[in-house]
Each structure stands twice: as structure tokens, then as C-alpha cells.
Amino acid sequence: MTEVRAVITQQEGAVSCNFEEVEAYIKDRLKEYDGAIFTEESKGYAKKELAKLRAEKKELNDNLRDAKKKYMAPWDAFEPKAKELINLFDEPITLIDGQVKAFEEDRIAQKKALIEAIYTELVGDLADIIPLERIYNPKWENATTKEKAIREEVVAQATAARIALDTIHGMHSDAESKALDVYKQTLSLPEAISCINAYEAQKAEILRKEQERQLEEELARVRREEREKLKAEQKALEEREAQRLAAEEALE
């Protein structure tokens, strides 16, 4: 079918007005009100002048409005017909657009199924560590994103997770479970390690304080035993001295 384009024929309209003459009249007309002061006695005159000014202003405004209406009349008659032509495109556009959207939705659904299959294949037992929604990249759904690129990204995520798990397990910390939770939440190995380091530092501090307490208790025990030993020795010495004195008295 030969394409037919709309040919719009337009004649430039011309609108004129004796602006200068009217402007000169209005300015001259309004000079008589410069600095005007009205009193209670001249209130009636003031009201009449106000009504006259408003009437003249309205007349000028009405003339301009009427001129615009006449000037726009051809366009007002032309525009509805033009819009009818434009609206003829809506039905086929809506029909084709709906089918195109359906095609795209079907393509995305197939791509999502492919992504889930790749994830299941490559992540395996790490699913609870890196669930799909945590590593999902919306750009994977794009038509330009190839399967190879998706696989490479999923492999990279799985590899990073396995390295993180091996590192956390290798630290042999009582805080391992907590560190794993931190990694699941953040997918950040440094944060998981920081969690273990903080726990171990706290544990070391508790151990140090416990050792200090035990040392203080041991020192207190030794001091107590020393005091008791000194008391026992002093008592034995006093008993021997008493026995010696008693023996000397008996000889006398």
C-alpha cells in the first residue's frame, strides 16, 4: 500500500490593533487620576469614576477575547478532525503492543527458568548460604545477557562462598556459628572474620582476667599459709622456752 501523508495547508493569519493610539489615549486618560485624593464628600464621584474605569477595562478585554476567538475559530474546527485521524492508530497500536509485551513476558519467564536451572546446577549445597534472591542480578533477564555470562557470575559467587566457609571453619572458633550467620546476612568474609576476631579477643580478655583472679587467690593462699606457719613456729618456740624454764626451775 502506498503511504499517504497528511498535507496540512495553512494560511498565516494576521491580527492588528492600533496599540499606539489606544496606549496614548489610556495614559492620557489616566493622568487625571495621578495623586487623586477623594474625601467623604466626593465618595459618590469616586464610585462613578471607578465604575467607568472598570467598564473601559472590561470593554478592551472583551474585544481582545472576541478577537482571539475569531482568530482561533479555524483551528478549533480543524483540530477535532485531526485528532480523529490520530486516534485511528490507537487500536492497532494497542493490539500489537499487547502481543509484543506478551512475547517479552514469555521471554523473561524462560530466562528466569534458565537462571534457576543454572543456580541449582552450580550452587548445590550452598543454597542455604547464598540463596538465589541474594545473588540475583536483574540484568540476567536482559535479552543481551548470554547464558555464559550468567554462569560465570554464579560460579564466582559460589566459589567466593566456598572459600569463605573454608576460611571460617579453618579458624576453629567457638564463634563459628555466629560468623556463618554474619556471612549469610552480608556475604562478606571480612565481616565474618571480624566477628570471630572480636569473639576471640573477648575470650582472651576473659581468660586473662580469670588467670589474674586465680593468681591473686594463689598469692593470698600462700600468704595465709605463711602467716599460719609463722604462727605455728612462734607457738612451738614459746612452748620450748616454757619447757626450758620449767626444767631449770625443777633443777633448782
Image: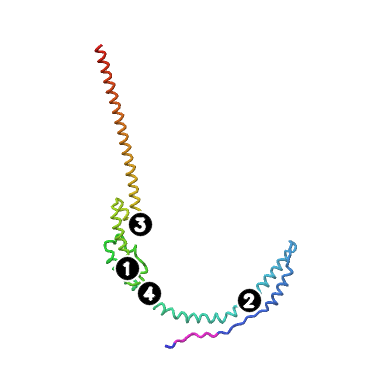
Tell me the quarter of the picture where residue 222 sits.
Answer: top left
Label disc, if present, on residue 190 of the rendered structure = 3
Q: Judging from the image, what secondary structure is the residue with disc 1 in?
A: helix
Q: Judging from the image, what secondary structure is the residue with disc 4 in?
A: helix
Residue 5 vs residue 62, the one in the foreground? 5
Q: Position of residue 132 (x, y in %)?
A: 32, 64
Q: Earlier in the sequence, mark 4 or mark 1?
A: 4
Residue 1 vs residue 55, the one in the foreground? 1
Q: Residue at x 29, y 68 (%)?
A: 118
Residue 226 vs residue 112, the one in the foreground? 226
Residue receiving disc 4: 101
30 displayed left or right of 141: right
Q: Are marks 2 and 1 in contact (CB under 8 Å)?
A: no
Residue 38 vs residue 221, the one in the foreground? 221
Q: Is residue 25 magenta?
A: no
Tell me the quarter of the picture where residue 98 sits.
Answer: bottom left
Q: Residue at x 71, y 68 (%)?
A: 49
Q: Main secondary structure of the magenta part?
A: loop
Q: Are marks 4 and 3 in contact (CB under 8 Å)?
A: no
Amino acid type, callout 2: Leu
Q: Judging from the image, what secondary structure is the residue with disc 3 in?
A: helix
- Judging from the image, the colouring scheme is rainbow
Please provide the residue range marked out in magenta.
Answer: 3-9
Residue receiving disc 2: 64
Q: Earlier in the sequence, mark 2 or mark 4?
A: 2
Position of the C terminus by quadrant: top left
